[in-house]
Image (tube, rainbow, N blue to C red):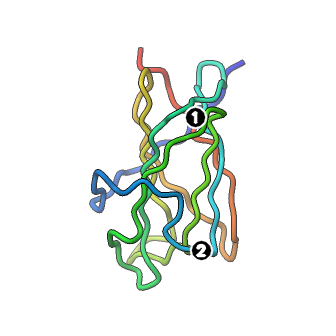
Amino acid sequence: MRCEPTREDGLGPMYKPDAPLRTAVGEGYLLSGVVRSAADCTPIAAARIELWLTGSDGHYDDDHRATLVSAATGAYRFASNYPSPYPGRPPHIHIRVTAPGFQTLITQHYPTPAATAAELDLVLRPAH
C-alpha cells in the first residue's frame, strides 16, 4: 500500500530554526494527525515537526513557534490559537517535517473558517 505524499508548499520568509519543544502555543485550535511514509503508509516515530503561525495580532513572533516530536505511533497533536490572516494571505500554519531516511517536507495547513480542529497526516517521501 502507498500513501499520497503531502502537498508541498512554500517555507515563507518567517521560518526560524530551533523553536522550543512544546505541543501548544495557545488554545482554541487543535491540529493533529500521523506522520507516515509515502512508500508503505507506515507511521514514522520521532519525526521532528516544526510549526509557526501568526498570533492574534496577525504578526509572527517567538511565542507562536513550536517543535514537536511524533510519538512511536507517528501521532502528533498541536494546540494553538486559530491563525490570524497575514496581509495578503488566508489564515495558515507553516509546517516543516524532518526524519532520518526521508526528504524534508515543507507545507502549510489552511484551516477551514470557524473550525476548532483538523486532522492532517504528514506523508513523507523516502530519501532515496
Q: Nearer the viewer, residue 53 or 27?
A: 27
Which residue sits furthest top? 128
Residue at figure coordinates x 66%, y 25% from the top left:
41
Question: Is 16 placed above or below 70 here?
Answer: below
Residue 36: quarter of image: top right
Which image quarter holds the N terminus? Answer: top right
Q: Nearer the viewer, residue 117 or 92?
A: 117
Residue 127: quarter of image: top left
Disc nearest the viewer among 2 and 1: 2
Residue at figure coordinates x 65%, y 24% from the top left:
42
Q: What amino acid type should be assigned to the residue bearing mark 2? A: Glu
Left or right, 53 with respect to 115, comes to: left
Left or right, 78 with respect to 96, comes to: right
Residue with the mark numbered 1: 123
Q: What amino acid type should be assigned to the residue bearing mark 1? A: Val
SS class of the residue under badge 2?
loop
Q: Nearer the viewer, residue 31 or 73?
A: 73
Residue with the mark numbered 2: 27
- Rate crowding at label 2 as few (under 14), some (14 to 19) or many (20 or more) other CA atoms within 10 Å: few
SS class of the residue under badge 1?
strand
Q: Give coordinates of residue 106: x percent, y percent.
A: 42, 44
Q: Give coordinates of residue 26: x percent, y percent.
A: 53, 73
- Rate crowding at label 1 as few (under 14), some (14 to 19) or many (20 or more) other CA atoms within 10 Å: many
Question: Is 66 placed above or below 112 here?
Answer: above
Question: Is 51 placed above or below 61 here?
Answer: above
